[in-house]
Image (cartoon, helix red, strand yellow):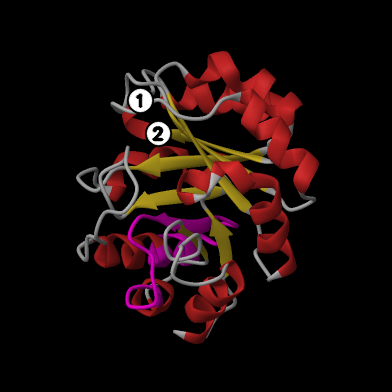
Amino acid sequence: MARFKLYPSILSADFAHLDKQIKESEKCGADGIHIDVMDGQFVPAITFGTPIVEAVRKSTDLPIDIHMMTVNPEKHFKELIEAGADSITVHHEACHDLKTTLEELGKHGVHKSVAINPDTPVESISNVMSMIDQILVMSVVPGAGGQSFIHESLTKIATLSNDIKSQGLPVSIQVDGGINSNTISDTVKNGANILVAGSAIFNDSFSICDGLSKLRNAI
């Protein structure tokens, strides 16, 4: 099976011990750190801003992967990148002109990614495939952690994987939402190569190392 990467999502982390948990994630084999930036407009919740990105950057050398669930994301590109972001995802549904937003993001030298919601067809981003480094398939409704994996997402992942291969594009498929030891195998089999997991890694019932190991061993 193809190599895949695991990105712990700090949405489920214990913020009283964030530095320790980030460092433990790196020590235990995480490939990157996923940070959800929510503005209370595109999604109801409000979460992390640049101070958290800066704190995570001080704690690890791993890639920092920013998932912007915000309207007008381009307003915040510069500050997030200066804080330490290596990759930025914008939502197709939140951008008035997705191409223009990606062109602006391209000026900053980070990996460019587009997220699509569970009810958004893959065809909606066909015109920007050559502009991006990654597609984020949301396998839950964005805005809250702990939701169950939407199994119809597997068809979307497979379709994107086939399209990327047929066009010979260097585009990764990231999946976020409901990733655990029961869902990760089918997700990877259908073509995902970056998996975001929150409560399956940051959990009071087991250690971060055990969480990462359970996910890798489930393949």
Q: Residue at x 66, y 25 (%)?
A: 51
Res. 103 image quadrant: top right
- Mark 1: amino acid: Ala
22 lies above or below 215: above
Q: Position of residue 19 (x, y in %)?
A: 70, 47
Residue 63 showing in the rendered view: yes
Query: As rendered, which of 210 and 41 lies closer to the eye?
Result: 210
Residue drawn 65% across and 64% down? 30
Give yes or no for residue 6 being in the magenta stretch: no
Amino acid type, residue under disc 2 in the picture: His
Q: Which residues are magenta?
A: 161-184
Q: Residues within 10 Å of mark 1 (few under 14, many from 20)?
A: some
Q: Report x, y in % for residue 195.
A: 49, 62
Q: Quadrant of residue 72?
A: top left
Q: Is residue 91 above or below residue 211?
A: above
Q: Looking at the image, can residue 219 be seen?
A: no
x, y percentage for residue 199? 42, 59
Q: Give the residue at mark 1.
A: 94
What residue is disc 2 on? 91
Q: Is residue 6 above or below residue 109?
A: below
Residue drawn at the location 50% of the way across and 64% of the way down? 201
Decide which of 17, 187 is in the foreground and name it: 17
- Left or right of 153 on screen, residue 111: right
Q: Residue at x 55, y 13 (%)?
A: 75
Q: Is residue 15 left or right of residue 19?
A: left
For marks 2 and 1, give the CA distance.
5 Å
Q: Is residue 168 covered in magenta?
A: yes
Which residue occupies the foreground of this view, 38 or 125?
A: 38
Using the image as rendered, state which of residue 187 and residue 49 is in the foreground.
Answer: 49
At mark 1, the secondary structure is helix
CB of mark 2 within 8 Å of CB of mark 1? Answer: yes
